[in-house]
Image (tube, rainbow, N blue to C red):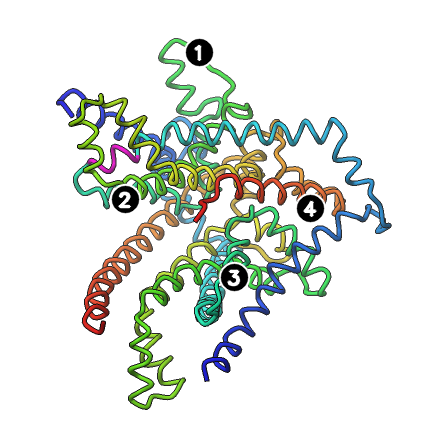
C-alpha cells in the first residue's frame, strides 16, 4: 500500500524535476558548445579565458563582494538592535515590507532620487557641495543594490540572533568580558550561520543583477548577469551566453559549498 | 545598555528605516505632482492616476499579471504538495537528500540562469513564447517554494495519526483528504501565498521567456523606466504599494492563525504520544 502511494506521488514531482531542473542545466551546458551558426566548437570557452571576459568576471565578483560586505555592515547592527526592541515582530515585518515591492519600482525611484535635479542633489546643493553626477556611476550601482538586499541580509541574521541563548551572553558578561569581547567571542561566532545564509542570499543574486546595471549604472557596470542577458536577448549569441552561464553555475555551486551548513 | 547607548541604537534604527522607506515615499509623493517630472513641485494633481486607468494596454497587462500569478500559484501549490508528500514517502536518507537538493536548485539559481535555460528549453520543445511559456516558468520556479513551506508541516505530523486513521479503517484517499491535508493546511496556504508573491514580483525570468506580444507588469515597468521618468509609473507604483500592504496584512493574519494552530497541533501531538 505504502509503496504504491509513494510511486504515485513521485511521478508528477519527478517529471517536474526532470523537465525544469535537470533538462535546463543540461541544455545550458549543451548550448555552450555551439557557435552562432550552430556548429560544434570549443571557441566559447577559449573566448571566456580572454582578458575581456576574465576582467568582466573579476569585476562582477568584486561588485558582488562589495554589495555583500556593505549589506552585512548595515544589516548586522540592524538585526541586533531589532531583537532588543519591543514589538520586534512588527519592526521586522516593516524591514521586510520593502522587499515585497517590485524591485524595478525601487530602482525606478532611485532614477528620480539620484537624478541631476533629484532630492539627493538638492540636499548636496544646500550643503554647499554642489551638484554631482550620481546616477550612472559605480557608487549608485552598489548603493541601490545594497538597498535592495538589506532585508534579505537582516532576516537570517535576525533569526540566528533570536535562537541564541541569552544565558550565554549573561555568563560571558558575569565572567568579566566587555561588551565588545562578548560580541566578538560569543555572539558573532554563534550567529555565523545566519551571516552565511545572508551572504548566500545576497552574493549569488548580486552576481547576476542585470536590470539594476541597465537602469542605474547605465551600462557602466557589466556583471555576469548583464553579459548573459546581452548574449541571449540582444546579440542572439546563445552559445557564448550559455558558456558564461556555465561559469556562473560553477561559481554558484562553489559558493554554496563554502557557505553551506554542514548538517 | 545605558541611556546614551539606547538613544544611539534608536537613532540607528530610525536612520535605517528612513533610508528603506525614503525611495518609496518619494515615488508615491511625486505621483501627485502636476509638473510631470520627479523633481520640483508644481501642484497637486490626480492626472497620472487618470492616465493609468485610461491606459487600456496597461490595464490588460495588469490583468495578465494577475491571471498568471493566480494560475501559476494554484497549479504550483498542487504540484508542490504532491512533491512534499513524495519526499516524505521516501524513507531512505540518501535519495531523500538528493531529492531535496534537486528541489532547491531553482531556489538558489540566479534568475538570469533560470530565464536563459528556460528560453532554450521552450525553444527546443517548440512552445511559443508568450502566455504559455511565462505561465509554465512561473509554475516551475514556484513549486520548490511550496515544497519547502509544506514539508516541515508534514514532518512535524506524528505518524501515529496516520496509523490511527488506518486502524480505524480509513482508505488511503481518506487518510490523505481527512487527516493529512487538513493538518498541513497552514503550510499549503503559506506556500500558495509565497508562490503568489514570487510570481507577482518576478522580472528576470519573465523577461527572458516573454517574447514580443505578451507582457507582465514588471517587464512593462522596466521598458517604460528605460525610456525615462513618466509619472504614470509613479501612480501605478503607489497603487501597487497599497496592494502589497494589503497582501502583507493578509499574510500576517494567515501566519498568526497558522502559528496558533501549530501550537494546538503540537499539544495534540504530545497527547497522542
Tags 2 and 1 touching, CB below 8 Å = no
Vertical placement of B135 versus B20: above or below?
below
Label 4 resides on the chain identified as A
Q: Secondary structure at mark 2?
A: helix
Name the residue carrying label 1: A130
For marks 2 and 3, give the one nearer the viewer. 3
Locate residue A22 relative to residue B270 in the image: left or right: right
Instruction: Tell me the tag on residue B171.
Output: none
State which chain disc 1 sits on.
A
Q: Dot 4, crowdedness within 10 Å: few (<14), some or many (≥20)?
A: some
Q: Which residue is mark 3?
A: B94
Q: Please give the range of residues in magenta.
A: A79-84
| Residue at mark 3 to residue at mark 1: CA–CA distance | 63 Å
Q: What element does badge 1 sit on?
A: loop
Q: Is residue B129 above or below residue B83?
A: above
* Chain letter for mark 3: B
Mark 2 neighbour class, 10 Å CA radius: few under 14, some 14 to 19, many 20 or more: few
Q: Specify which label sits upstream in the sequence, 4 or 2.
A: 2
Residue at which label 2 appears: A163
Towards the viewer: A245 or B35 = A245
> Which circle's residue, 2 or 1, is located before the other in the chain?
1
Q: Which chain is disc 2 placed on? A: A
On the same chain, marks 2 and 1? The answer is: yes
Amino acid at each position: 500500500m505504502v509503496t504504491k502511494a509513494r510511486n504515485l506521488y513521485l511521478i508528477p514531482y519527478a517529471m517536474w524535476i526532470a523537465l525544469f531542473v535537470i533538462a535546463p542545466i543540461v541544455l545550458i551546458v549543451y548550448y555552450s558548445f555551439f557557435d552562432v551558426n550552430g556548429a560544434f566548437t570549443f571557441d566559447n570557452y577559449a573566448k571566456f579565458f580572454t582578458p575581456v571576459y576574465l576582467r568582466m568576471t573579476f569585476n562582477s565578483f568584486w561588485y558582488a563582494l562589495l554589495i555583500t560586505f556593505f549589506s552585512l555592515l548595515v544589516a548586522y547592527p540592524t538585526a541586533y538592535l531589532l531583537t532588543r526592541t519591543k514589538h520586534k515582530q512588527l519592526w521586522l515585518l516593516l524591514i521586510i515590507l520593502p522587499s515585497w515591492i517590485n524591485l524595478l519600482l525601487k530602482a525606478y525611484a532611485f532614477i528620480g532620487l539620484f537624478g541631476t535635479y533629484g532630492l539627493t542633489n538638492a540636499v548636496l546643493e544646500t550643503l554647499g557641495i554642489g551638484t554631482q553626477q550620481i546616477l550612472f556611476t559605480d557608487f549608485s550601482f552598489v548603493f541601490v543594490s545594497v538597498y535592495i538586499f538589506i532585508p534579505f541580509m537582516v532576516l537570517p541574521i535576525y533569526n540566528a540572533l533570536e535562537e541564541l541563548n541569552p544565558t550565554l551572553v549573561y555568563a560571558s558578561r558575569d565572567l568579566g568580558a566587555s561588551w565588545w569581547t562578548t560580541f566578538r567571542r560569543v555572539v558573532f561566532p554563534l550567529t555565523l550561520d545566519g551571516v552565511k545564509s545572508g551572504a548566500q542570499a545576497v552574493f549569488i543574486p548580486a552576481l547576476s543583477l542585470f536590470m539594476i546595471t541597465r537602469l542605474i549604472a547605465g551600462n557602466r557596470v557589466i556583471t555576469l548577469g548583464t553579459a548573459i542577458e546581452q548574449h541571449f536577448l540582444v546579440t542572439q549569441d546563445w552559445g557564448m551566453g550559455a558558456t558564461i552561464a556555465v561559469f556562473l553555475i560553477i561559481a554558484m555551486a562553489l559558493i554554496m559549498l563554502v557557505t553551506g551548513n554542514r548538517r | 545598555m545605558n541611556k546614551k547607548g539606547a538613544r544611539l541604537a534608536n537613532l540607528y534604527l530610525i536612520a535605517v528605516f528612513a533610508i528603506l522607506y525614503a525611495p518609496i515615499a518619494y515615488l508615491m509623493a511625486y505621483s501627485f505632482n502636476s509638473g510631470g517630472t520627479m523633481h520640483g513641485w508644481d501642484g497637486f494633481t490626480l492626472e497620472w492616476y487618470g492616465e493609468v486607468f485610461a491606459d487600456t494596454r496597461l490595464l490588460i497587462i495588469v490583468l495578465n499579471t494577475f491571471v498568471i500569478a493566480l494560475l501559476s500559484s494554484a497549479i504550483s501549490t498542487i504540484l508542490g504538495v504532491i512533491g512534499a508528500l513524495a519526499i516524505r514517502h521516501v524513507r531512505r536518507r540518501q535519495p531523500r537528500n538528493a531529492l531535496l537538493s534537486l528541489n532547491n536548485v531553482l531556489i538558489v539559481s540566479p534568475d538570469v540562469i533560470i530565464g536563459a535555460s528556460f528560453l532554450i528549453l521552450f525553444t527546443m520543445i517548440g512552445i511559443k513564447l508568450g502566455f504559455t511559456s511565462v505561465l509554465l516558468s512561473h509554475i516551475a520556479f514556484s513549486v520548490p517554494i511550496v515544497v519547502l513551506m509544506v514539508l516541515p508541516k508534514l514532518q512535524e505530523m506524528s505518524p501515529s495519526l496516520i496509523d490511527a486513521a488506518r486502524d480505524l479503517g480509513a482508505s488511503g484517499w481518506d487518510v490523505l483528504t481527512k487527516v493529512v491535508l487538513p493538518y498541513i493546511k497552514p503550510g499549503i496556504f503559506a506556500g500558495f501565498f509565497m508562490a503568489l508573491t514570487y510570481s507577482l514580483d518576478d522580472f528576470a525570468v519573465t523577461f527572458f521567456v516573454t517574447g514580443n506580444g505578451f507582457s507582465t507588469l514588471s517587464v512593462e515597468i522596466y521598458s517604460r523606466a528605460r525610456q525615462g521618468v513618466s509619472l504614470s509609473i509613479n501612480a501605478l507604483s503607489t497603487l501597487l504599494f497599497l496592494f502589497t500592504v494589503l497582501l502583507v496584512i493578509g499574510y500576517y493574519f494567515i501566519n498568526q492563525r497558522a502559528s496558533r494552530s501549530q501550537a494546538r497541533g503540537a499539544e495534540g501531538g504530545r497527547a497522542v504520544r
